[in-house]
Amino acid sequence: MAVALGSTFHSRLNTYESFAEELGSEKNDTDDIVKLVYNASKRLKEEEDLPEEIEDLLDFVMSKRISLHNRNEKTWMKLLDKVNTALEYIEKDIDENIWDLMEQDVDPVSLEYTHSLITRSIKAYRDMTQTSVDDNVSELKENSQRYLKGFYYGIDRLVYLNSYKEFDKDELEAMDSLETQMEKNNHFVPQNDEVNEITINASLV
Amino acid sequence: MQKSSPDTNILIYGIVGSENNYQEELSKDYLDLRLDDSHRQLVLQEVISEYRRVLKKQVGRMRPLLRVASSTGSFEKAEDRCSLNNVHENFWNEVKRLYNPENVQKDVSNFKRGKISQMQRRVNNMTIIEDECVLDQEKLSMIETEINEEKNVKTDAIILYKALLLSEDHEEVILVSEDGDIRNCNLKELKDIIGAGKCGNMSIQGLRTFF
């Protein structure tokens, strides 16, 4: 998965902000992922240089609205797949490029908190949708909302950080607290972060 | 379930460094105690938030170095170009030992995620135990009353109370606070306080030394 060459990280960040706001903002009163992505499609349809993975997702929702409305299982699963692909792209892009903001004097510790919240919430969402499809639907919805809100808040804070360079102590704690709350869910079990048994300075243990 | 200590909070001061030498010394003292088979302590602590904070802060402070190391393929060049003042030496040396400079940005991110996941599992295990605790508000209030001149009284009282409920046959526990402070707590005396509804054999001054 390659990051789009024709756009800068700053311009992609604006796209992610719009995308995340539709998916995870408090202003949305629905947990229906179809409606959320549909709203994002309407908002982003005029935008140029959309990353391919996001454009593909938006096109899919626009073209499959009837099947999705009728809850066609195959189409529904395809949608979740495409949401995950788009989020995976964003996660990778953030992972690779967020540190370049240090060149604009953005505080590295603030970036660390933001990076952690964004990548963790995306990963949690992907893990959940890939492993919990047979679980209780209401729990699935509740959790997906929680993770998408974490994603939105992280992106929102990254945009803020891009302008204001640094968080204060309260802001850092708020981000940390959100990440902790997100993971306190008993149903969340990290799938791919296998126990990292590398123990730094093992002689201490 | 074994009621062992989720001791990682204090371990992190030894592993990734701390704000001051005092915490690292505490870490060493604590580890010495843990390695001594004659002690069977229960350690209670609020771990996850502090763990995240320390880990993120330490990794964050290293990011400028990691970025230069990645782009130049050299840890030495990173050290030449960036300040090492705020970076914990132990942590930085171990990162250099474990990872190649070319991929170190990503490797350290994965390391951070892995460690937090690992910690989360440990905390989840502890949460199950804590959920079994039913705190009698009247008794909790008694403990609070005894320490009512201390800061964060409620939290400390809850920790003490949980230590008591989870301790079973232990007569003494070691409490590790979020800032790395370590105190011994004699549970028998605490039981006396709650059981008698008053200070029992212990003076108020004596109880305050727990914190």
Image: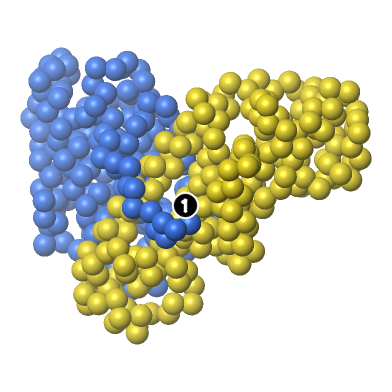
Chain colours: A blue, B yellow
Q: Chain of mark 1?
A: A
**Residue drawn at x 9%, y 26% as measured from the top left:** A64
Please indicate whether residue A163 sits to the left or right of residue A37 in the image.
Answer: right
SS for dot 1? loop
Q: Which residue in the protein does label 1 denote?
A: A205
Residue positioned most to the bottom: B80
A61 relative to B23, above or below: above
Q: For residue B131, what is the image quadrant?
A: top right
Q: Is residue A104 left or right of residue A175?
A: left
Residue A193, quarter of picture: top left
The answer to whether residue A102 is seen in the rendering is no
Looking at the image, which is closer to me, A65 or A156? A156
Query: Is B4 on the left-hand or right-hand side of B60?
Result: right
Q: Position of residue B155 (x, y in %)?
A: 69, 38
Looking at this view, name the residue that lies furthest to the front: B38
Disc 1 marks which amino acid?
Val
Residue B68, how many percent across, how many down? 29, 75
State the image quarter where residue A153 is shown.
Answer: top left
Q: What crowding class fits label 1: few (fewer than 14 Cα within 10 Å), some (14-19), or many (20 or more)?
A: few
